[in-house]
Amino acid sequence: MLEIGSTLKQLRQKAHLTQKDVAEKLHVTPQTISKWERNKSYPDLDYLVKLSELFNVSTDTLLGTTKPAFFARLFSKKKRGAFPMTEESVSSNERCKQVYIFSISSWINDGEWQTQRLQMKLQKELTDNGCPVAVHMFSASKIQQLAPKADLIILTPEYHFALEQLKKEYPHIPVVPLDRKDYGLLNTTKIIKKLNSLS
């Protein structure tokens, strides 16, 4: 039997929302939220997705069936090579994992500034979540030189055409194309969610 009620209540309280607040956001009655929190009834799939988006958690978290996320698995892998130290929060004998964002934009255009903003926001969100990751951005012209040093490669939307080739050249490195909308809105929360869903 599902026991999502206590999780839902904790998430709601953590977000400083009342049952009425959540009900209004989901277009249901407060009594429905109350029943969900008391495990008297359960949200259907559509509402599970809406709840996961509202509280910024996976549906697995709501259902209590979480598995190690991509970054957790990334950190647990055997350390390889000599990666540069970056964040002070990382202990002296732990190396940061390297996330490289590659873009074909030139430095002077808006696309490159957008990628730079994405890189800084992604770095901050991962650091705030306790992930020992160093996020860098580079021109696509440097991909042959730098890609082998990456633990994760992210491609900006205009560089998607290189996805299959990079997967062939670097089969041991995850290569993730960014959704144009998430890139444009700098939706790092959704980007991290997508990365965490990688198997």
Image (cartoon, helix red, strand yellow):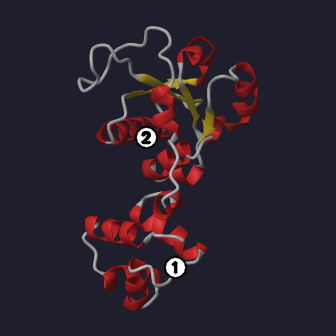
Tell me what residue is drawn at x 50 percent, y 71 percent. 50
Tell me the number on the disc at residue 42.
Answer: 1
| Residue 5 versus residue 185 in the image, above or below | below
Image x and y of residue 93, in percent: 32, 13
Task: Work out which residue is located at the far front of the displayed protein and give it.
Answer: 1
Q: Secondary structure at mark 1?
A: loop
Is 188 situated left or right of 10 in this image? right
Q: Quadrant of the C terminus?
A: top right
Q: Amino acid at mark 1?
A: Tyr
Mark 2 or mark 1, which is nearer to you?
A: 1
Image x and y of residue 156, in percent: 58, 38
Mark 1 Cα-neighbour bin, 10 Å: few <14, some 14–19, many ≥20: some
Q: Secondary structure at mark 2?
A: helix
| Residue 99 versus residue 118 in the image, above or below | above
Tell me what residue is drawn at x 53 percent, y 21 percent. 150
| Residue 40 versus residue 3 in the image, above or below | below
Tell me what residue is drawn at x 46 percent, y 23 percent. 98
Nearest to the observer: residue 37 or residue 156: 37
Residue 107 appears in the rendering? no
Tell me the number on the disc at residue 118.
Answer: 2
